[in-house]
Image (spheres, rainbow, N blue to C red):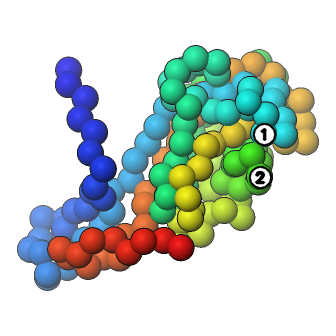
Amino acid sequence: MATTTFSGVARSYGGRNKGVVSPGVLTMSVNVSGDSAQTSGGDAARMRIGSSATAGELFVLPKGAIPIQVVCTVAGTASDTVDIGTSADPDGFFVGAPTHTKGTITGAAGALVTAAGITTDQQVYIDASAGSPTGTVTFIFTYTVVDNGRSGESQPELS
């Protein structure tokens, strides 16, 4: 099966005509993993695309991204939580995401989650939070991107 990647913002008019209704930006999801015992934004705390905490492409959110939720799909080995954010703000996207229950949904509540989206591309990190989780944990990380809703116009540069 072919994989298609493009750099544009994907929008839908919900079956209506352009100019009649405002377009909606589509959400995107990435399967990501991290070592739930990591702390303080070191190299080992970088989240990766796929099911491995140590192999695969690094997970980097694009400028303008607005995280929405993470869903735990492969639980770690200890009953605890992790934070997900950046090296500068370890809980910037998600605070206290459970690592031990498959199917648990955590909404984005960190300080970096704003209507304006993130201002630069950001490497995503996992942080053991205040607990003692262990093992690789895998999430479906869902986000959208900033869109001005104007038909046929390019997106403004974020400052």
Q: Dot 1: what SS?
A: loop
> In x, y percent, where is residue 113?
62, 63
Q: Is residue 34 visible?
A: yes
What is the distance, in whole Å, between disc 2 and disc 1 at their CAs? 7 Å
Q: Residues within 10 Å of mark 2 (few under 14, many from 20)?
A: few
Q: Dot 2: what SS?
A: loop
User: Could you tell whether 82 is left or right of 108 in the image?
Assistant: right
Which residue matches tag 1? 41
Q: At label 2, which amino acid type do we have?
A: Ala
Tell me what residue is drawn at x 90 percent, y 36 percent.
Answer: 131
User: Could you tell whether 11 is left or right of 121 in the image?
Assistant: left
Q: Residues within 10 Å of mark 1 (few under 14, many from 20)?
A: some
User: Could you tell whether 75 is left or right of 95 in the image?
Assistant: left
| Closer to the camera in the image, 131 or 122 | 122
Q: Quadrant of residue 54?
A: top right
> In x, y percent, where is residue 150?
26, 79
Q: At label 1, which amino acid type do we have?
A: Gly
Tag of residue 88: 2
Q: Quadrant of residue 38?
A: top right
Tell me what residue is drawn at x 71 percent, y 64 percent.
Answer: 111
Q: Residue furthest left?
A: 17
User: Could you tell whether 156 is left or right of 120 in the image?
Assistant: left
